[in-house]
Image: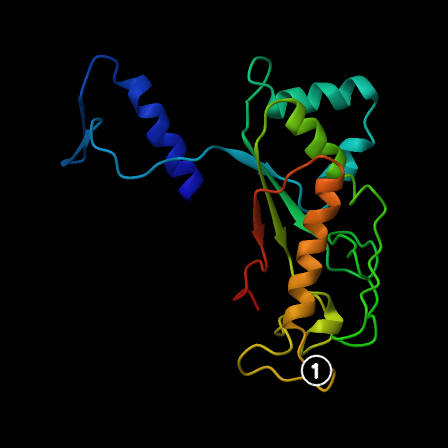
Amino acid sequence: MALWFSLAAALLPLLAVGQHNLTARQSGTTVTVNLDQKYQIIDGFGCSEAFQRAVQMSKLTEDKQQYTLDLLFSTTNGAGLSILRNGIGSSPDMSADHMVSIQPKSPGGPSSPPKYVWDGSDNKQLWVSQEAVKRGVKTIYADAWSAPGYMKTNGNDANGGSLCGVSGASCSSGDWKQAYADYLVQYVKYYLEANVTITHLGFLNEPELT
């Protein structure tokens, strides 16, 4: 809703050229918009690579790939989107909706040495990120859908549950808070090694959905 509201607010000046106040009347209701009054700053507009959209894009022919990337990120031949949102995978394997974790199997416990797995692709999200950066994108937001299931009270990266060790969530396997933080930092490091800077990092997504 915020996206569409912001988009409408951005378009209003185009609809009211030469006016500082725009008044609309319908069914006896009057709405006056003062275009000189600022309520919020829009950092930009973007798109998400969730649900393996990058994988789908990678299956296009080379010319269609570049055409699609330009439509999204080019400021001259496309929408000029300035924000890219990546999903940090939490699944032990590839499924229809989820993305693979960089540590699909438990290392044995929260204090055990991590066993990260990096394929240099991240479900093709790294490729799209690199292409977006080439086209001027500077804001990349990586958001974790969930902690891996073995770090949670329900043993699953879906269907609710809590991170072991947070308030009210104890597990026989131990406290996974620091291990999860290290896991997220490692994800950012993998991108940095590929010359892509993740500027914003989220550790959960829709926590109250289930």
Pick the front one: 124 or 187: 187
Residue at the image point whose x is 52% and y is 66% from the top: 208
Q: x%, y% of residue 61?
A: 83, 22
Q: Residue at x 47, y 32 (%)?
A: 44
Residue 84 vs 94, above or below: the answer is above
Q: Residue furthest bottom?
A: 172
Q: Which quadrant: the C terminus? A: bottom right
Residue 198 horizontal/vertical position (percent): 62, 42
Position of the N terminus, as image quadrant, is top left
Q: Is residue 25 left or right of residue 104?
A: left
Residue 182 located left or right of residue 11: right
Q: Quadrant of residue 162?
A: bottom right
Left or right, 81 with reference to 29: right
Q: Amino acid at mark 1?
A: Gly
Expressed as whole percent of the image width and height from the top left, the position of residue 27 reads: 18, 35
- Residue 152: quadrant of the picture: bottom right
How many numbered markers are drawn?
A: 1
For the rendered model, the colour scheme is: rainbow
- Residue assigned mark 1: 174
Q: Nearer the viewer, residue 3 or 24?
A: 3
x, y percentage for residue 142? 62, 47
Q: Report whether 67 appears left or right of 120.
A: left
Which element type, helix, strand or loop, lies under badge 1? loop
* Residue drawn 67% across the image and 57% down it: 184
For disc 1, the neighbor class at 10 Å (few under 14, some 14 to 19, many from 20) is few
